[in-house]
Amino acid sequence: MLAGATLLAAGLLLSAHNLPATAGLQALLSAWLAPAGATREIVALAHGWLPRLAVALLAGAALGAAGAVLQQVLRNPVASPMTLGVASGAQLALSIGTLLVPAGLGALAEPVALAGGGLALGATVALAWRRDLAPLTVVLAGLVVSLYLGAVNAALLLFFEYDLQGLLVWGGGALAQHHWGDAAFLAPRLLAAAGGLALLVRPLTLLTLGDESGRALGLSLRRLRLLCLGLAVYLTAAVVSAVGVIGFVGLAAPALARLLGARTFGQRLLAATLLGAALLWLADQAVQPLDAWLPGLLPTGAFTALLGAPLLLWLLHRQRPAPSPRDALAPPAPTPAAARRLALIAAVALALMVLALALARTPIGWQWSLPWRVVEAAPWRLPRVLGAACAGLLLALAGVILQRMTRNPMASPEVLGISGGALCGVVALALLAPAASLPALLGAGTAGGLGTVLLLMAFGRRSGFAPEPLLLAGIALKALFDGVLGIVLASGTPLWTRVLDWVSGSTYGLQMDTALAALGAAALLLPACLAVQRWLELLALGGEHAAARGLAVRRGRLALLALAAALTAAATLLVGPLSFVGLMAPHLARLLGLLRARDQLLGAAGIGSALMVLADWLGRNALAPYELPAGLTASLVGGLYFMWLLRRA
Amino acid sequence: MRARFPPPASPGAACRRAVLYAGLATALVLLGPAHADGRAGGAEPVVAIDWPFAETLIALGVTPAGVADAAAYREWVVEPPLPPETVDVGRRGAPHLATLQALAPEVVLVSPFRRAPGLERVAPVRELPLHAPGESALYGATELARELAARYGRETELQGLLARLEHALQRLQVAAEALGGPIYVAQFMDAGHLRVFGDGGLYGAVLARAGIANAWQGPTSYWGFALVALARLDAEAARLVLVEPVPADAEAVMRASRVWSSLPVVAAGGVRRLPPTWSFGGVYAAIRFAEQLGAALASGG
């Protein structure tokens, strides 16, 4: 209560501070009716400050409502428009639209954003369908879809730097207004959706009873879910096409509503709508004085992501850890052909490395050189191939450990947020000291990664490093770092392509000594992973069963988390935080029949190296002389295959 | 290539032969004839990674062997036009090393910011700062032109460019005196936000040299601009010069927004447009900017 009152007071004070002028009602009316006669300050108040306030309230309310609906339909306390990939889908669709129609999308922006958001949500739901839309799986699937769509967007940004740079500011969620256009756009849409939702409150409340009861009471579940999801996407797409991506309001508002005691769905919906409006209003008013003394722009959307992540972490901290599912599994029988398959994987990986070294595209056409000649003729190729192979190996191992430890097929090194932490370290140093050298940046990245790991460990201690809280904390941290990245990209610095390059996983310029260090790290960590394969085998059965078989579960999980963190940090410093290898390689290994921990570790390691080497080679040669970073190529090419794979599995 | 062989003994053998021929054909397609040197005749053995270097070289009459992001240069910088012999070496942040090697340049010119690691393995790299911190960007650009002219023996062209710059600056100074007030120079980034150029960049340096007061007194980034919402352009300025291109949404905002039309400089009818010039360029961009600004300020009152 006290906190709420303080925040409200702070919001009012800030709003008053940001007022360009004070005016009576008379003056305001004259500003609207006869603007030519009014002074500049009054006009700024009537056509700038007030619309901005209106848009903040409307957008916040829309996002809060969308979040509440998503959480009810998916029965997931951490679902929100941003975590389910809707915003990324809308953003990517708008980027593509801008490229296809350079003159400007104008009125087409809304349907385009709607289509993009809808497709993204559809992909998320399809990915999580096999696991009956279990809450954590849905969120992770949403993360996978956001990562993938973000990768495509990053590729477009790298190649069409000047065509799309205008979208960067909008993408950060800048709310500055100069006319009532956006407010007039959002208001009727919010009202229409609110009307629809008001009619649907009763059926949605019945969803709380569970599927069987709902069906028994005469609900058409599928139709209801589709309709409500459609409304949520509609609201989100309207906000995104008007003001860009605003993070966390859609998550924080329903969560706060629950915290403040709203019990029924109707109460939660109303409270979430009002709280969403209040939160965005507060954030927007807080941003304005900060914005005035920075030379770059501080977009409200990226700022809310910064605020929202600690909020989410705090919320998770308060929750009691959910008991893990009690299904008992027996360790799988060893596959007879495992050794042969592992040998095949190793052979393919080596063959790809040779290919990557020997075959390259030059201005005169494709050229095949003998591998040992390459070392003198093209000395930059060997460290890159080696670096890519090691990074792929490290990421794959981290993926296997995380997927087995958390018993969730969607877990991956990116989800932990470690790579995001490393990125933040690098960005912070690059902003403070623009002329910093590469070793200094690497050091900053390591510090950032380690800091994130410590945060995760501190966070997970309370729940005994149980999988769910850990993954959720990782998602929150990742969102925090996305906010930082959004701010950097929107700040208008011409270096944003360099940051994007690094974020997208480029092996460009990798030196031999770094590659050898990576090889050394791989040589140390691979045996370490093999040494703990029994723990991996046992933890895949679940915490209680593992303990029953004699494993010190807490210590084991901590050690595995530390190992995964070390693997991820090393790989991030090589190829940046974005690639799908850590997610894909364990799945591919399992598809090839390598079910036991040891087999899966070795198989995934081989597959991971092969994938990264192939991605690096494709990125270097497919569009020569334009290079795509390895991590980005792996995400683009592999991501699609991976999502198809998941549907089949 | 017509191969004459005796007819195959069985379908299996035919199949294997077909695969063999296909494999050979593919290999031949993939293997191109190897040339030692990929550089076109008439081009100097220099590769410019950053566009100011390319622009200055071409303005001095030197055809560089390679330029990074050549396609985007042709679209966004436009002048001076890139000669057709110049090869595209890839993205500025990640130039294609195999292409660079085939061009066999004597020197690769790169700025410290865009410095991609690993370039020195391919060719000698010369890092030229575009301008030192605290130094005028215009001074940095002219020094760069002097150095490149000395290296490639283009003294006459250099003197021509410098004379043109002086002339343009003098005209600008005359136009500015007639104006009697500060001006804004800005470029729309999206519908509601502009880059307004202040101290530290090329445009700001040209204005300072010509004695024109800059109406933007707020903080600027290292590159000499500030990204602001359009309502911040609220000083009493004589002119607001917009550098094209202007996005379509921004046109709509300029037509419809009361906030825009209530800005003092807009209300007084002081908005002028400049054809696109490259805001982070070298001496040629400075000349173009000064000439076009002078023309815009002189005409239309």
Image (spheres, coloured by chain):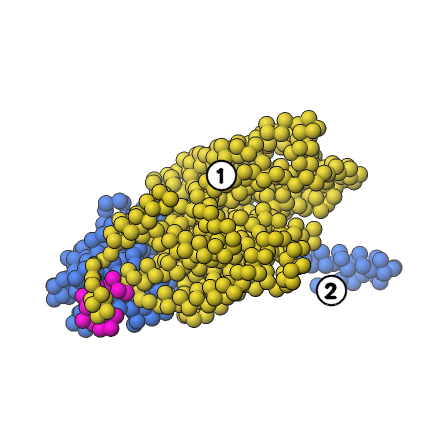
Chain colours: A yellow, B blue
Circle 1 SS class: helix
Residue A436 location, x and y as percent? 37, 39
User: Label 2, on which residue?
Assistant: B2
Q: Residue at x 29, y 61 (%)?
A: A50
Q: What secondary structure is marked by label 2?
A: loop
Q: Position of residue B157 (x, y in %)?
A: 27, 59
Tag 2: amino acid: Arg
Give the x, y percent position of residue B53. 34, 53
Relative height, residue A417 to residue A87 (above, below): above
Left-right relation of A406 to B6: left
Of residues A433 and B88, the one drawn nearer to the viewer in this rendering = A433
Q: Which residue is mark 1?
A: A318
Q: What chain is tagged by disc 2?
A: B
Q: Identify the residue shown where x is 41% and y is 65%.
A: A186
Answer whether residue A45 is magenta in the image.
yes
Q: Residues within 10 Å of mark 1 (few under 14, many from 20)?
A: few
Quick check: can you spot residue A217?
yes
Label 1 marks a residue whose chain is A
Judged left or right of residue B35, residue A308 is left
Tell me where the magenta segment starts and ends, as one range. A32-47
